[in-house]
Image: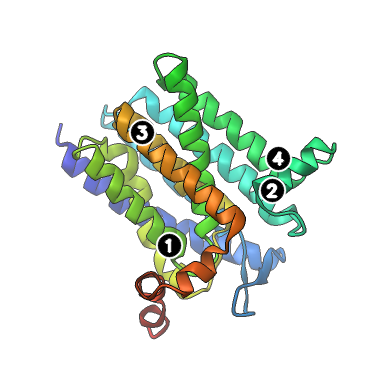
Amino acid sequence: MNIPLIAGLAILAGLILERIVLYFVLNMLRETGMVGKNYQGDTIPLSTGITFPVAIMPVFLIYELFSCYDSSYSLFLLGIVFISFLGFIDDSLGRRDTLGFRGHFSALFRGKLTTGGLKAVGGGFIAFFLAFFVSDGWLNIILNTLIIALAANMLNLLDLRPGRAIKGFFFCLLIVVALAVFAVDPLLIAPLLGIVLAYLPEDLQAKTMMGDAGSNVLGLALGFLCIMSLSLLPRIGILIFLIAVHIYTERFSLSRTIENNAVLKAIDQWGRNEFRRL
């Protein structure tokens, strides 16, 4: 079995399927009024990240045809579909008068369930569900649950400007691959790579907004890859980093931080003008 070849074909299949699915979904969202203002004030389709789980599932079906389907892939797909569904609910029904973990859980303790609270609780549950079935012992279950849940939300925190969440996804993916000394399952992440590459031009041109339905998928995929690829110490380091990011963003504006740092601002701006000229 030629794994690199199959992984390459999976990337290509994900790219093609995402372009097809995205074409129809964008029209559907416009016709149903699922649109909103982006940071520039332009009206664009919202929650287009719902295309990610739709485009990724046929690729894993192909894996089965090639007899290279692993049982862990079923958990991965379940997590992606579930978190994208919760994100879509928040994108379509959510109100922005309650923000952050603190705000959503404060409302929950008062007996009020926000869509963000539903996503946080549901996301925590699916993170625990995935961790429970792939982890050995309660220490690993708790550690892996926190990694998946916080990674899913971290990518959501980045999705405030065109291309930012996808750049964060690629950067974090490189870190995970490096920490794992390249001992990652390429078939697990390959289809999503193709999907993200197909979606990237639309995102950089600010023509669509992936929303929580997409950013949470990217984050959950990173978290799942972490727990499947990394040993204990790197996972503890990843968790400390995720906690630090969430504490920081509860107190400070991430967008303002990026704007005030020349290097981060340059990375954040990269590709936007180039793709708009296409």
Quick one: SS at disc 1? Answer: helix
Residue beneath the point at 78% across and 38% down: 108
Residue 126 falls left or right of residue 116: left
Label 2 to label 4, Cα distance in Å? 9 Å
Q: Position of residue 161 (x, y in %)?
A: 51, 69
Is residue 115 positioned above or below 273 on the image? above
Mark 3 or mark 2: which comes first in sequence? 2
Question: Which kind of residue does numbered mark 3 sit on?
Answer: Arg
Label 1 to label 3, Cα distance in Å? 29 Å
Label 1 to label 4, Cα distance in Å? 27 Å
Q: Find disc 4 in the rendering and name its residue.
A: 118
Question: Which kind of residue does numbered mark 4 sit on?
Answer: Leu
Tell me the quadrant of the picture where the C terminus can be found: bottom left
Mark number, residue 199: 1
Mark 2 or mark 4: which comes first in sequence? 2
Residue beneath the point at 62% across and 63% down: 46
Label 2 to label 1, Cα distance in Å? 21 Å
Q: Position of residue 189 (x, y in %)?
A: 33, 43
Quick one: SS at disc 2? Answer: helix
Label 4 to label 3, Cα distance in Å? 26 Å
Mark 2 or mark 1: which comes first in sequence? 2
Q: Find disc 3 in the rendering and name its residue.
A: 235
Q: Position of residue 45 (x, y in %)?
A: 61, 67
Say few, some or many: other residues with alpha carbon within 10 Å of mark 4 (under 14 / 14 to 19 / 20 or more).
some
Mark 1 or mark 4: which comes first in sequence? 4
Mark 4 or mark 3: which comes first in sequence? 4
Which residue is outermost to the right? 111
Is residue 200 positioned above or below 132 on the image? below
Say few, some or many: other residues with alpha carbon within 10 Å of mark 2 (under 14 / 14 to 19 / 20 or more).
some
- Would you say the residues marked 1 and 3 are in contact, meaning their CB atoms lie under 8 Å apart? no
- Would you say the residues marked 2 and 4 are in contact, meaning their CB atoms lie under 8 Å apart? yes
